Image (cartoon, helix red, strand yellow):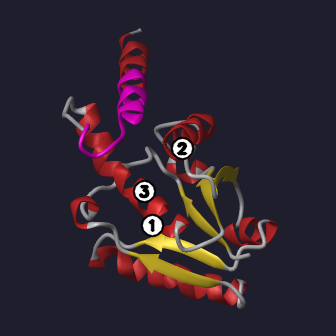
Amino acid sequence: MVVAVYPGTFDPLTRGHEDLVRRASGLFDTLVVGVADSKNKKPFFSLDERLTIANEVLGHYPNVKVQSFSGLLKDFVREHDARVIVRGLRAVSDFEYEFQMAGMNRYLLPDVETLFLTPSDQYQFISGTIVREIAVLGGDVSKFVFPSVDRWLQKKIAATRDEQAS
């Protein structure tokens, strides 16, 4: 049985992320989507919110598990006996960082491979950062996220505005 881990902050989970999950889930017996705590990134959504969103969008895949992790990815990979780390490459600009991370992961986990997947054409330009920025500025993100994610974004933006108004 081949287990793979797809780690990320998923802040928010986009159609591009789901595209990679759909395709990677067809390659492995089990795909564990690892939602990183990432406190150093100051995420828009809390870890619990990101887990809920990921489960809402990805829950219908029978061989996909969504779990949170903090600390080193290598420990999460070992915890799940994974043999592959799945990473997405949207553009050439992603390559340098991902290449460095793959090299470090190979050093820390010599028996684990990193598999790079490129998104389907319509998702190559989507990132959680861009989606958040568009949503916060009042733009339509419905082509980039699932309806449930759009609702989460609108609710969070409204709550943030209410806090700032107080």
The image's mark for residue 23 is: 1
Taking the spot 59% from the left edge, 75% from the top edge, the residue there is 85
Q: Which residues are magenta?
A: 142-155
* Left or right for 84, reference 99: right
* Left or right for 19, reference 114: left
| The one of 39 and 134 positioned closer to us in this rendering | 134
Taking the spot 66% from the left edge, 69% from the top edge, the residue there is 29
Which amino acid does the dot numbered 1 rest on?
Answer: Arg
Mark found first going from the N terminus, 1 or 2: 1
Which dot, 1 or 2, sits closer to the camera? 1
Taking the spot 48% from the left edge, 50% from the top edge, the residue there is 10
Mark found first going from the N terminus, 1 or 3: 3
> Is residue 147 inside the magenta stretch?
yes
Which amino acid does the dot numbered 3 rest on?
Answer: His
The image's mark for residue 54 is: 2
- Is there a contact, CB below 8 Å, between mark 1 and mark 3? no
Residue hosting label 3: 17
Q: Disc 2 to disc 3, how far (Cα)?
A: 10 Å
- Is there a contact, CB below 8 Å, between mark 2 and mark 3? no
Answer few, some or many: residues within 10 Å of disc 2's Cα (few below 14, many 20 plus, some between 14 and 19).
many
Which amino acid does the dot numbered 2 rest on?
Answer: Ala
Answer few, some or many: residues within 10 Å of disc 1's Cα (few below 14, many 20 plus, some between 14 and 19).
few
